[in-house]
């Protein structure tokens, strides 16, 4: 038995209560944050321990390792990487260089993650920000037009896959236009359908073949004025599965974010009822974890098929010369400074 949720953990090793919870509730996967990360040896031990408790070698372990300000693995034990905007800017100077830099950065990130037992990165982003939008996306985005964003996102995906890491496309169907941070409150986007379809959703369509995607806690009033995409059957069926054409495993963004209303249990029920395949819960707070597990069914039917297909799509890693790849990445990013001088 495996239940349709991904859970966070409280610290750098499993507590006895977490071990009991994992054995009883059997989540599909886990997600790591800074509170779970100290050294490479410690993280490798934690990921191995989680898999040992479940008795499954292929348990997905996720992290948000984008580069820029969103990096859970950081110095002194891991290097820093450029923010996504750098690749879009380089793409603007010369597309081939921007794509090469994006691929190199993702390939190096993949190597960092694979070494400690992490198998999934919550990357790439296909959000297209607009002037005046909340900075929660900001320089994490690859550009301000859907063509650039989709092209760079594809290069990032290829870099991750070359390193044996599964990608998660986010935040579908788009968080770039939001005027609020969904961690704190519910963003409402009142943009007409034609504009959304030609810009926001258009960045996601070329990436609809990715194995997994994460929803946006954003209301798109032209389609559903009451519910954010995460808990809107209309948005999931008509836009994410329909207009965009994404058919992979669809997980929620963190069910604990303030954009969603109701208790953790009520949010969990709502997003599953709307058509999400998987619940993501990040806080590592055991009482909340029990609420999520209590409302989450065993994986079955289409969600199970999509989950199996996602894991089966993971590729064997190719070798990489880290020193050569990092030197090339730094040289490419250095061209931005030279171009602006």
Image: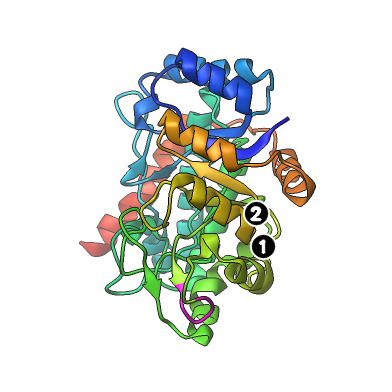
Question: What is the magenta segment's predominant secondary structure?
Answer: loop
In this picture, is 208 found above or below 286? below
Circle 2: is it few (<14), some (14-19), or many (20+) Cα within 10 Å?
Answer: many
Could you say which is closer to the camera, residue 326 or residue 147?
147
| Tag in front: 1 or 2 | 1
Q: Is residue 221 left or right of residue 48?
A: left
Q: Which residues are magenta?
A: 220-224
Label 1 – label 2 distance at C-alpha: 8 Å
Residue 122 visible in the displayed image: no
Rendered residue at 38%/32% (across/down): 73
Residue 142: x %, y % from top left: 42, 61
Is 222 magenta? The answer is yes
Left/right of residue 193 with respect to residue 161 in the rendered view: left
Q: Quadrant of residue 235?
A: bottom right
Residue at (35% x, 73% y) in the render: 130
- Image quarter where the N terminus lies is top right
Query: Which residue is disc 2 drawn over?
Result: 210
**Mark 1 near mark 2, Cβ–Cβ under 8 Å?**
yes
> Is disc 1 placed on a helix, strand or loop?
loop
Residue 162, x across and y down, in percent: 62, 40
Quadrant of the drawing holding the C terminus = bottom left
Q: Is residue 68 above or below residue 226?
A: above
Q: Residues within 10 Å of mark 1 (few under 14, many from 20)?
A: many
Residue at 43% in and 68% down: 128
């Amino acid at each position: 038995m495996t239940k349709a949720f991904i859970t966070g953990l409280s610290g750098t090793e499993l507590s006895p209560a977490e071990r009991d919870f994992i054995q009883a509730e059997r989540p599909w996967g886990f997600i790591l944050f800074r509170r779970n990360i100290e050294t490479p040896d410690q993280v490798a031990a934690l990921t191995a321990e989680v898999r040992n408790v479940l008795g499954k070698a292929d348990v997905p372990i996720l992290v948000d390792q984008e580069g820029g300000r969103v990096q859970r693995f950081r110095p002194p034990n891991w290097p820093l990487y450029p923010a996504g905007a750098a690749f879009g800017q380089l793409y603007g100077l010369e597309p081939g260089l921007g794509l090469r830099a994006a691929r190199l950065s993702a390939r190096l990130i993949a190597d960092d993650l694979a070494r400690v037992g992490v198998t999934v990165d919550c990357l790439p982003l296909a959000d297209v920000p607009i002037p005046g939008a909340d900075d929660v996306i900001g320089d994490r985005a690859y550009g301000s037009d859907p063509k650039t964003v989709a092209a760079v996102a594809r290069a990032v995906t290829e870099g991750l896959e070359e390193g044996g890491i599964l990608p998660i496309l986010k935040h579908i169907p788009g968080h770039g236009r939001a005027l609020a941070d969904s961690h704190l409150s519910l963003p409402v986007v009142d943009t007409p359908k034609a504009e959304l379809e030609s810009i926001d959703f258009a960045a996601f369509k070329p990436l609809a073949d990715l194995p997994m995607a994460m929803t946006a806690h954003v209301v798109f009033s032209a389609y559903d004025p009451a519910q954010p995409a995460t808990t809107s059957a209309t948005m999931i069926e008509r836009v994410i599965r329909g207009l965009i054409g994404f058919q992979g495993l669809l997980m929620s963004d963190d069910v604990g974010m303030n954009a969603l209303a109701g208790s953790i249990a009520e949010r969990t029920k709502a997003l599953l009822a709307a058509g999400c395949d998987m619940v993501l819960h990040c806080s590592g707070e055991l009482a909340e974890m029990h609420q999520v597990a209590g409302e989450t069914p065993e994986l079955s039917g289409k969600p199970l098929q999509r989950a199996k297909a996602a894991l089966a799509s993971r590729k064997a890693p190719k070798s990489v010369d880290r020193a050569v790849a990092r030197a090339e990445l730094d040289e490419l990013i250095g061209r931005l400074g030279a171009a602006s001088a």
